[in-house]
Image (cartoon, rainbow, N blue to C red):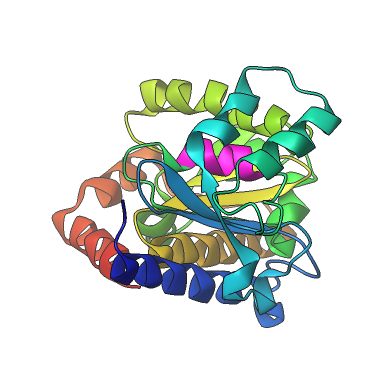
Amino acid sequence: MIDSTRYEEIRSDLLEMSHQLGNPAHRFTILGEGNSSAQLDENLFLVRASGTELRTLQPEHLVATRFETTLSLLDNNASEEETEVTLLESRNDPKALKPSVESTFHAWLLRQPGVNFVGHTHPIEVNKILCSPAAKLFASRRLFPDEIVCCGPKSLLLDYVNPGADLAIAIRNSWDQFIRDNGFTPKILLIKNHGLIAVGETANGVLSATQMANKAAAVFNGAAIHGKIQFMTPGEVEKIHNRLDEKYRQQQIRKQT
């Protein structure tokens, strides 16, 4: 059982991360787009309530939700009506607001090693690419060193699927294969015609990955105007990924909140 001090720390970090992700100046989300979450302990996680906005998220808009109940949606082929009932049953406090319909993928990701926070957004620059044939190229190549440091050498790309349990199942089915193919865990998940999911050990890790992915998308879109995009070579990407000083920078980013 998590103690009250640690609970307040996690909730505070999640609220700050959510406000930054929802800040209109960043153009990551508008209106009620996006959602966020954080692991509390092995049984519970906090997730944004349905119908709330990241930019104005308040403590009462975060729902303490049970992993076990939420993850049951991955295997029971529930209808929309059954999903609604399960989401309400997953609340640790029956008087709390209803958890986001995307709670299932948040629950699954938060159970993965090294993932304590999750942020899902729809950045305009990123979606310009994800709504185009260039999505695979953007996910698989890197443009500059800081993109590698904050977003990893490659991103996990998924085809569009319906939000909710279908998306969670697609993430589950692709995650382990990505690790087997690449030898590292993705920091960024990209969903065609939808948006971006960033995962991290800390709230700052999620925010940094989201910010850098959006910068990379802006650079990608701008470079395309001038002709063929000049990517870093696989060897250059691997060298940055394994440099001791860059690993130190990654550690510092993860420690910050």
Position in image of residue 152 (x %, y %): 40, 48
Q: Residue at x 69, y 62 (%)?
A: 123
| Position above or below: 193 against 55 | above
Position in image of residue 110 (x %, y %): 44, 43
| Position above or below: 161 against 243 | above
Q: Is residue 30 left or right of residue 250?
A: right
Position in image of residue 5 (x %, y %): 30, 71
**As rendered, which of 74 and 154 lies closer to the eye?**
74
Q: Is residue 165 magenta?
A: no
Q: How many marks?
A: 0
**As rendered, which of 33 and 65 lies closer to the eye?**
65
Quarter of the image where one finds residue 223: bottom right
| Position above or below: 219 against 148 | below
Magenta highlight range: 102-109
| Residue found at the very far top of the displayed protein | 76
Q: Residue at x 38, y 39 (%)?
A: 234
Task: Examine the rendering and report whether any part of residue 140 can be seen.
Answer: no
**As rendered, which of 164 and 80 lies closer to the eye?**
80
Task: Examine the rendering and report whether any part of residue 256 can be seen.
Answer: yes
| Residue found at the very far front of the displayed protein | 94
On-image quarter of the C terminus: bottom left
